[in-house]
Image (spheres, grey):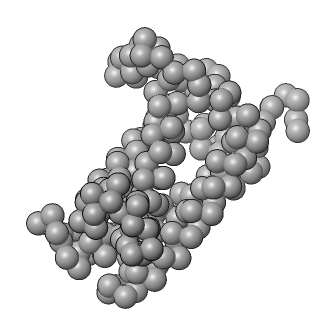
Amino acid sequence: MNAAHPSIHPVWLRITHWLNALAVVVLMMSGWRIYNATSFLGFSIPTGITLGGWLGGALQWHFAAMWILAINGLLYLAMNLASARLGRKFFPLSIKGLTADFLAALRGQLTHADPSRYNMVQRLAYLFVMLDSVLIVASGLVLWKSVQFPIVRELLGGYEGARLVHFAAMAGLAAFVAIHLVMVALVPRTLVYMVRGR
C-alpha cells in the first residue's frame, strides 16, 4: 500500500461491490421481464430495458443472478462484521446528524473531503440497501418456493403479499441505484476509489 495514497476500500469490498452491482442489474432487468408476464400492477415495463426475451429466459437470468446476490451478499456482510467495518463505517446514526447532512446535501454543501468516512446520508442509504436486499431475497424465496417457506410467506402476507413486497423492494433498490449514480457523477473520484481502492 502506498503511504501517500492510503487504501479507502479493501480488495474484498471492491470485488463484492462490483459483483453485487452486476447481480442487481441482471435481477432488475430480468425481473421487469418476469413482471411483464402478468403486469399485476396494471402497467408494463418497456421491453427495451428488460432481459431474457421471454418468460423462460428471464427466469433463467433471474435465478442465476439471485445466487450471485445471495452468496456474495452474505460474504459482504460476513466480511463487514469480521473486520468490524460495519460498526465503524455505518454507525453511529443520529436524527440530528442525518437532518443536518440531508439539508446540506439539498443545498449542494455536503462535504466529501474525507473519502474514508461516510456522512450520515450515506450511512442510512447503505444500511437501507442491506436491509432492502434481505427483503428482496426473502420475498423472492417465497415466490420461487412458496411451499418450502411457509413462515416467511405468512410474514409477508401470503404469496400475493410477497409479490407486492418483492416489487416494492426492487423499486426501492432501483431508486437507490439511480441516486447512487447521480452522486458518483457529482463526485467522480468515488468511482476511482471503488476501482483502484485508493
Residue at image location 60% in from the left, 37% down from the top: 189
- Position of residue 42 in the picture relative to residue 101 (left or right): left
- From the viewer's perspective, is 159 left or right of 108? left
Residue 108 seen in this snapshot: no
Q: Which residue is drawn at 59% across and 44% down?
A: 191
The vertical placement of 190 against 174, above or below, is above
The foreground one among 172 and 143 is: 143
Report the residue at 70% width, 35% height from top: 85
| Residue 105 drawn at (x, y percent) | 40, 22
Residue 177 x %, y %: 42, 49
Give above or below for 110 relative to 15: above
Quadrant of residue 139 within the rendered picture? bottom left
Is 186 left or right of 172, judged from the image as shown? right
Using the rendered view, name the quadrant where residue 2 is placed. Answer: top right
In the rendered image, which quarter contains the C terminus? top right
Task: Please provide percent x and percent y for residue 90.
Answer: 59, 30
Q: Is residue 159 left or right of residue 192?
A: left
Q: Is residue 82 above or below residue 66?
A: above
Judge whether residue 158 can be spotted in this image: yes
Is 175 drawn above or below residue 142 in the view shown? above
